[in-house]
Image (cartoon, grey):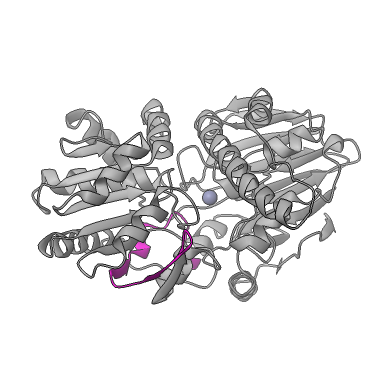
Amino acid sequence: MEIQFFGAAKEVTGSCHSLSTKEEKILIDCGFFQGGKDMERLNYENFNFNPKDYDAMILTHAHLDHCGRIPKLVSQGFRGKIFATAATKDLALVIMLDAAKIAAEDTMHENKRRAREGLPARKPIYNDTDVRAAMKLFVTVTYGEEVKISKNIIAKFYDAGHILGAACVQLKVDEKKKSLVVFSGDLGQADAVLVKNAQPIEKADYVAIESTYGDRLHPPIDQRQKELVRIINETHKKGGKLLIPSFAIERAQEIIYCIGNYMRDGLIPKMKVYLDSPMAMRATEVFSKYPEYYNKEVQESIKTRKDPFDFPSLIKTQSVEESKEINYLKEPCIVIAGNGMCTAGRIKHHIRNSIGNKNNTLLFVGYQVEGTLGYWLKKGEKKIKLLGVQVDVKAKIEAIDSFSAHADYKGLMKWIENYKPKPKKVFVIHGDEEQSEAFSKRLEKAGFKSCVPSIGDKFEI
Ligand SMILES: [Zn+2]
């Protein structure tokens, strides 16, 4: 059996891994590379494998860096089944349609430039039709169920505690000898706002584990409420706008759920809260379909607060006109808009219009990939170029890291220590090189055999 890493190796994005026996080949995830133009260009390059050679695919969860290249994979000949939980399937549709829309817009701009330079026009990475074709290949599975993926491989999905529907996957490979291989997918931080904690897995011969925060610790979980309440109150006092760039999936729903609770409990004043993201609205509809995936606290709360993602002063803005009207609002308000790293979407317009005013606040509640606008703003950049104009950053920049959907190194260690006996080898993936190396060292110190593969590395296991 062979394991190979085609992405998210010594980097965070572009998850795509391969497991093959003499009789079959399967893929685990096929996501976008993200973080600046150079990384995104990689999405347009040919796969370093033939999609037609693969028999099946497992999608661990619906984040763009895990599902983003699936329609391209299908348009290039992949015809196997794609196994995922029902929530992952529904959320992946939202994500991939949005990626197709952004690709169409980007390609339009790119082709204008190419025409000026006398270069041939480029096609978008994929379109809506490719997304619909990919959706036809999905087969849904439930946590705990054993599913036959291919001739010799049976998969079992475990809740990863990361985002709605996210899974760690344990693969039972029955070749000449039997082996258990686990792909962690992305592992959540314990006590997330909405989803349950990651389920422990106890048996594996080989594990591929994420290491986004392989060398970092998150602030305590109670900071979430304390900090969010403080920042909302301070901005309200100044009469300013609070802009929250947010991922459409999970983070937007978490923020709305928290703000709704704080307002109801009188911790923050009543004020208008705009959810200015049609994509987050679509994702919220998916969340409402799967209340069984919520943690106990949210399940309890929906007995009284029927819809956890709604409250009286929440305004959902669909059209661009409605979104533009927020600019003229003279009272304090909160604007939640996508995307989470400020690389596209309505948040860019809100930042351009509001960042020059010291009474406003820009609050980061999610991971910022190096090279993105969000990354530079969070780092404290004082001048930015946005939508063709130079803007001075005068608004207050704040960040709350305790919302993270990823476990920190203590959480990762706790998860890997559930395996009895220890796996024969642990592959440390899905992290910037220094994070992965640091986590690998930690593993070695704890008696695990580990390595940090590079893109393309292949291992006979
Ligand atoms: Zn993820």
In the image, residue 202 sits, relative to residue 357, either above or below, namely above
Q: Is residue 108 above or below residue 242?
A: above
Instruction: Name the side, left or right, on which 26 lies relative to 345.
Output: right
The residue drawn where x is 46% and y is 52% is: 188
Quarter of the picture containing the C terminus is bottom right
Is 430 or 146 nearer to us in this picture?
A: 430
Q: Residue, x 46% and y 71% (percent of image)?
A: 376
Determine which quarter of the picture holds residue 378: bottom left
What range of the chain is rendered magenta?
386-409
| Quarter of the view holding residue 81 | top right
Instruction: Please tell me which residue lies in front, 94 or 305.
Output: 94
Residue 400 lies in the magenta-colored region: yes
Q: Quick one: which residue is furthest to the top in this view? A: 136
Total labels drawn: 0
> Picture coordinates of residue 213 (x, y %)?
51, 66
Asked if residue 428 is positioned above or below residue 52 in the image, the reply reads below
Residue 427 showing in the rendered view:
yes
Q: Position of residue 399 (x, y in %)?
A: 34, 66
Residue at horizontal 88%, vertical 41%?
176
Residue 217 is at least partly visible in this image: no
* Residue 231 as seen in the image, left or right of residue 181: left
Viewer-side residue, 309 vs 350: 350
Above or below — where is 13 with respect to 277? Answer: below
x%, y% of residue 460? 86, 55
Give coordinates of residue 400: x percent, y percent.
Answer: 33, 64
Q: Within the magenta stretch, is there residue 46?
A: no
